[in-house]
Amino acid sequence: MRSGRWISALNRSARWVPVAQQLAGAIQSLDAYRTTAALARNMAEAMRSRAVIEQAKGMLMAVSHRREGGVRPARVAFPTLKHKLRDVAGRIVEARSGVRGRVY
């Protein structure tokens, strides 16, 4: 009689295996979705930042009459500045054009 109870208990728990597998798959899909959404948000922010940086580079190139780019003069002008490049670029765009160059 004992072995009968044991087998019955195994049969009942075995019914939950497919449900647990489906639940695990759903959790993995949700995690993948969240990771992809975060990556998309970061890429969108990087693209907006890059536009401001490129605009500031163009302004610095026009002022310095250089063809090589404006990042090097910015690094020379602000060697110890502890700000992100996109924030410095936003300030340059804002100062030169009167338009806010910050990334939102």
Image (cartoon, helix red, strand yellow):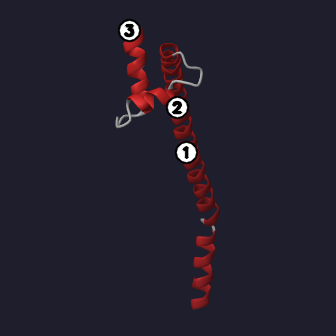
**Along the line of sight, which residue is nearer the eye, 14 or 74?**
74
What residue type is disc 1 on? Thr
Between marks 3 and 2, how big is the CA–CA gap? 23 Å
* 1 or 2: tag closer to the N-terminus: 1
Residue 5 appears at what percent x and percent y? 57, 84
Estimate how packed mark 1 is, as few (under 14), some (14 to 19) or many (20 or more) residues with alpha carbons within 10 Å.
few
Are circles 1 and 2 on residues that touch, CB within 8 Å?
A: no
Please tell me which residue is depicted at 61% across the width and 86% down the height of the picture. 4
Residue 2 appears at what percent x and percent y? 57, 90
Residue 9 appears at what percent x and percent y? 57, 78
Q: Is residue 8 above or below residue 83?
A: below
* 1 or 3: tag closer to the N-terminus: 1
Q: Nearer the viewer, mark 1 or mark 3?
A: 3
Between marks 1 and 3, how big is the CA–CA gap? 37 Å
Please tell me which residue is depicted at 44% across the width and 27% down the height of the picture. 74
Are circles 1 and 3 on residues that touch, CB within 8 Å?
A: no
**Along the line of sight, which residue is nearer the eye, 87 or 58?**
58
| Label 2: element kind | helix
Please tell me which residue is depicted at 50% across the width and 24% down the height of the picture. 53
- Residue named by callout 1: 35
- Residue named by callout 3: 98
Farthest residue, direction front: 65
The quadrant the N terminus occupies is: bottom right
Does any portion of residue 45 appear in the rendered image?
Answer: yes
Residue 46, numbered circle: 2
Q: Is residue 4 above or below residue 82?
A: below
Does any portion of residue 1 appear in the rendered image?
Answer: no
What residue type is disc 3 on? Gly
Q: Nearer the viewer, mark 3 or mark 2?
A: 3
Q: Is residue 7 above or below residue 101?
A: below
Q: Nearer the viewer, mark 1 or mark 2?
A: 2
